[in-house]
Image (cartoon, helix red, strand yellow):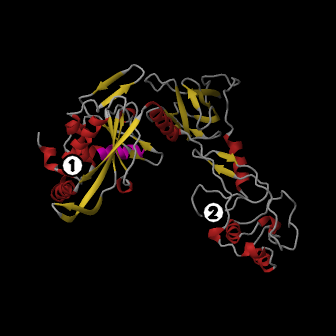
Amino acid sequence: MGIHIIKMPDIGEGIAEVELVEWHVQPGDTVVEDQVLADVMTDKATVQVPSPVDGKVQALGGKVGEVMAVGSELIRLEVDGPGNAAAGAKQKRPVERTETAAQAEDATAPAPVQERGADAHVATPGPAQVPIKGQAGQVQPAQSQPQVQPAAGAGHAAARPAGEKPLASPAVRKRAWDLGIELQYVPGTGGGGQITHNDLDSYLARGAMGSAAAGRAAGYAPRDDEQAVSVIGLRRKIAEKMQESKRRIPHFTYVEEVDVTELDALRARLNAQWGAERGKLTILPLLARAMVLALRDFPQINARYDDEAGVVTRYGAVHLGIAAQTESGLMVPVLRHAETLDLWACAAEIARLADAARAGRAAREELSGSTITLTSLGALGGVVSTPVINHPEVAIVGVNRMVERPVILGGAVVARKMMNLSSSFDHRVVDGMHAAEFIQTIRGYLECPAMLFVE
């Protein structure tokens, strides 16, 4: 038997360190060649690290959320044969996951159950510590809760010594929580002193809750639970990116109202005639086309600004970032050469990129290199927003919710579909007048959609 050490791989592009975002194995697990061991994240994408050999996991070399240098020890395996390291070689920062998991399991046992979210944990009365599950599944101890005294009029002392954990099933714990009963003071008559539903009934019959506690409804019971969520992985990258953008770019936002009645009618007509054959169109491909045409007259907006070098690079190609919400957070896959795509090709590529981002399959090159970004929250778009520029770009166009409301048109009050464009610009390189003219040009294309097809 030997030891095989797997080091953090060199992912390329000059990357010196990566973040460990998920382990797929634990110490003691048996792995086979090509089995995925861990997920690591660069600034651009998540990469899976496979095992090059068969073996048994001896120890892990880092914790979830830790930033590790390329070439550092990631994991060590026990393998048949000599391996690639001496059995007694010193290991870098092993992570005893099994012990942590056991401690977490012990700590979790007395926690009451609450049906208000998979990750919500209710603080247990008494000095026991409550585990709090973070974003990456790490268990962290919360602060000890003070021992709660029985309500006035309880008429008896604590049913068990201070510090002793009350035993009860999840159903009993939930019922006690809903009734406002502190299990620390309920005598248990079940096996091993476990508290049963009959014990709760007896406690209530004795009037131990007092008038104030007895009148408490489940929906108004006080809550003291806390949840500590580790900001790691994609969430940390998003936080760093947003902080960097707001720190370096002096944003200004320009909002304009657009009548999209004709645009939406055109979209519906195209879908009715060609939807079954070419696929359904959303409003995004039409917006993308309007941006492509408008950027021909405003090349300073289709640009990236290297503020350290003091150079603005203007692009002829429109590499349009499409902000997509995923379970892990906001990602911006790139619609490359949007100027070459017709409506259906644009719609198909947007759908493909969004699906890849949500499934975690987007490649690094699909998540970088955008020259301007389009962001939309769809039906949740609100009335006005202040989108954050995707650094080092100089502009972002935000789409708000489309609503039908009364508008005065030709002296008559008519129902029209209205939508706001809320767009932000880098005021260092984009003047306010040019930003306003750019949005007004987009508005012209959207309100007269036939112009989208006139060259």
The picture places residue 31, in percent across and down from the top left corner, at 56, 38
Q: Which of 259 and 36 is in front in this view?
A: 259
Residue pushed farthest front? 411
Does 386 sit left or right of 292 as displayed?
Answer: right
Q: Which residue appears at 44% of the width and 24% of the height?
A: 12
- Most common SS among magenta residues: helix
The picture places residue 407, in percent across and down from the top left corner, at 24, 61
Residue type at mark 2: give it: Gln
The C terminus lies in which quarter of the figure?
A: top left
Q: Is mark 2 on a helix, strand or loop?
A: loop
Tell me where the magenta segment starts and ends, as one range. 350-359
Residue underneath mark 1? 446
Residue pushed farthest bottom? 205
Label 2 CA crowd tier, 10 Å (few <14, some 14–19, many 20+): some
Residue pushed farthest top? 309
Does 192 sit left or right of 224 as displayed?
Answer: right
**Does residue 324 show up magenta in the picture?**
no
Q: Which of marks 2 and 1 is in front?
A: 1
**Does residue 354 show up magenta in the picture?**
yes
Q: Which residue appears at 25% of the width and 59% of the height?
A: 417
Q: Can residue 389 be seen in this view?
A: no
Locate residue 368: give its quadrant. Answer: top left
Q: Which of 8 and 77 is in front in this view?
A: 8
Label 1 CA crowd tier, 10 Å (few <14, some 14–19, many 20+): many
The picture places residue 282, in percent across and down from the top left corner, at 26, 52
Residue underneath mark 2? 114
